């Protein structure tokens, strides 16, 4: 029974962490986007516009929770949670400090790539249950995109698993060596791009595509339910950068104690900043380019990386 | 059942499993049925987890629960050409009843005759590495044949959906 209670506590903690990350992330993203596009970003509310997100959160919470008349009510209401829960769960297997991951499991790496796959169902259902063509098209696009990019994403993490000889994140951290960085760099690039696609950020935000699909699956959502979708996206961003920092860049290694956690979070922050930078620099892709990138560029790259690591291991 | 399995958790998961299956069978809307089915898949993954079969549980989530999105895609592609609700018929015909009865009898016979029941839980759950050694040692040939069949079907899918120039 205690397992259930711990699970509930963990779920609450993960929800709060993601909310906080989204709170700071929205502000940071606006500031960075502003700088990239030669603007200032928010600056009126609080120092450096820090309280802007607070005002926005308040606005979202106070908005009416609209359920349009024609929607499939039950699915429409539950879809945001189906998208959010896997994002929160994937935070659980990340090794945060020496010998500590909230869920210490022997299949952690697989868990990390498998569980977010559930959110595809949520996005698809959100689009379908809205009962409008734009939303359904957006849902279909999201499904095609996320299913395609799952493969290179999974393959990109495999070389590290091979090198460590274990799928348990803590074992990977124990076995980690600095020369893995150059060796698995192609893998990291594939992981980075596939993660961007997996969380629907800008070069890959075809499912939302405001100009063509009026926000796609999220078109009919308002207020808190829309905010849950946005938070799931930030949760995915946080989880992807934390996991990338741990597996590809050694996370907390080399620095003892609580300082190690700070170093780990800083490394993840650099990856997250890179993701924002990419989002605000490149234009949206076309659907055919998107599919070609996944199947003709990223998957072969990941396979080459896998063969490379396999050759190095046999030579060691 | 051995002492290592937590009773309340098993009860919840078993209820979710059977309840989801009943929900799936009774749902008239095909998308609702798909959603119920994915709930059953997740509950089964939970049961695997309860038995310390972590790898099996995660693979169950990866392959079955998330592949529900593909099922939903098929439903939208194949049945929702018109914007009507995707309602299916309830089939109470004699033929359907006989088919269901036969399936039940076959399942019962298959399950009841198994002599090698597991009497006790193993002390230490065998890990992913042991499973991998078994797959690539004793069962290499079936594994490779299965992989080949999947590859052939993948090539066939690409061939079917290729762009025809002429």
Image (cartoon, coloured by chain):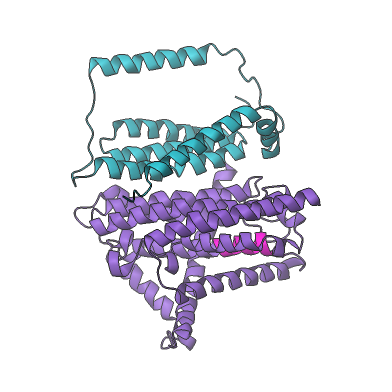
**Image-based side of B126 in relation to B162, left or right:** right
Residue B76 image point, x, y percent: 29, 45
Q: Residue most toward the front? A: B166
Residue A156 image point, x, y percent: 60, 55
Q: Nearer the viewer, residue B130 or B125?
A: B130
Q: Which chain is cyan in the picture?
A: B
The span shown in magenta is A240-252
Q: Name the residue at 35% across, 39% down.
A: B34
Q: Which chain is purple in the picture?
A: A
- Residue B80 belongs to the span the image colors magenta: no
Asked if one can make out residue A192 in the rendered structure from this viewpoint, the answer is yes
Residue A161 image point, x, y percent: 68, 50
**Image-based side of A231 in relation to A156, left or right:** left
- Residue A251 belongs to the span the image colors magenta: yes
Measured along the vertical axis of the image, is residue A172 above or below residue A238? above
Q: Nearer the viewer, residue A55 or B86?
A: B86
Measured along the vertical axis of the image, is residue B81 above or below residue A16? above
Q: Name the residue at 68% across, 31% down.
A: B134
Q: Name the residue at 57% across, 30% down.
A: B145
Rendered-image quadrant of the N terminus of chain A: top right
Residue A175 image point, x, y percent: 76, 55
Asked if one can make out residue A82 in the rendered structure from this viewpoint, the answer is no
* Res A43 quadrant in image: bottom left
């Amino acid at each position: 029974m205690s397992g259930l209670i711990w699970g509930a506590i963990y779920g609450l903690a993960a929800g709060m962490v993601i909310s906080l990350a989204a709170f700071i992330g929205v502000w940071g993203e606006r500031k960075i986007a502003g700088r990239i596009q030669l603007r200032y970003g928010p600056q009126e509310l609080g120092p450096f516009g820090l309280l802007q997100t607070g005002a926005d959160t308040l606005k979202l919470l106070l908005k009416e929770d609209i359920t349009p008349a024609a929607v499939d009510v039950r699915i429409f209401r539950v879809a945001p949670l189906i998208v959010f829960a896997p994002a929160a769960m994937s935070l659980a297997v990340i090794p945060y400090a020496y010998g500590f991951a909230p869920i210490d499991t022997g299949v952690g790496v697989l868990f990390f790539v498998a569980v977010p796959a559930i959110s595809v169902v949520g996005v698809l259902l959100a689009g379908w249950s809205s009962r409008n063509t734009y939303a359904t098209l957006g849902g279909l696009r999201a499904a095609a995109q996320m299913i395609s990019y799952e493969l290179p994403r999974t393959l990109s993490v495999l070389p590290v698993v091979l090198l460590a000889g274990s799928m348990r994140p803590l074992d990977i951290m124990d076995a980690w060596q600095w020369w893995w960085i150059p060796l698995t760099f192609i893998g990291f690039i594939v992981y980075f791009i596939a993660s961007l696609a997996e969380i629907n950020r800008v070069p890959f935000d075809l499912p939302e595509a405001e100009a063509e699909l009026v926000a796609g699956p999220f078109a009919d959502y308002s207020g808190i339910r829309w905010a849950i979708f946005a938070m799931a996206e930030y949760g995915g961003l946080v989880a992807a950068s934390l996991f990338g920092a741990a597996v590809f860049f050694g996370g907390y290694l080399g620095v003892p104690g609580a300082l190690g956690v700070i170093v780990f979070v800083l490394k993840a922050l650099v990856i997250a900043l890179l993701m924002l930078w990419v989002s605000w620099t490149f234009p949206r892709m076309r659907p055919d380019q998107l599919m070609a990138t996944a199947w003709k560029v990223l998957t072969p790259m990941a396979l080459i990386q896998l063969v490379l690591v396999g050759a190095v291991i046999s030579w060691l | 059942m051995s002492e290592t399995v937590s009773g309340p958790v098993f009860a919840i998961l078993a209820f979710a499993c059977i309840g989801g299956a009943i929900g799936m069978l009774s749902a008239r809307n095909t998308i609702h049925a798909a959603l119920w089915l994915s709930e059953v898949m997740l509950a089964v993954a939970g049961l695997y987890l309860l038995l310390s079969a972590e790898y099996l549980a995660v693979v169950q989530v990866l392959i079955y629960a998330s592949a529900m999105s593909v099922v939903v895609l098929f439903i939208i592609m194949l049945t929702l050409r018109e914007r009507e609700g995707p309602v299916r018929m309830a089939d109470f015909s004699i033929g359907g009843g006989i088919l269901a009865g036969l399936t039940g009898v076959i399942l019962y016979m298959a399950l009841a005759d198994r002599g090698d029941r597991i009497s006790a839980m193993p002390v230490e759950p065998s890990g992913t590495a042991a499973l991998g050694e078994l797959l690539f040692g004793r069962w290499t040939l079936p594994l490779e044949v299965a992989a080949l069949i999947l590859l052939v079907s993948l090539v066939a899918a690409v061939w079917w959906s290729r762009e025809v120039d002429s």
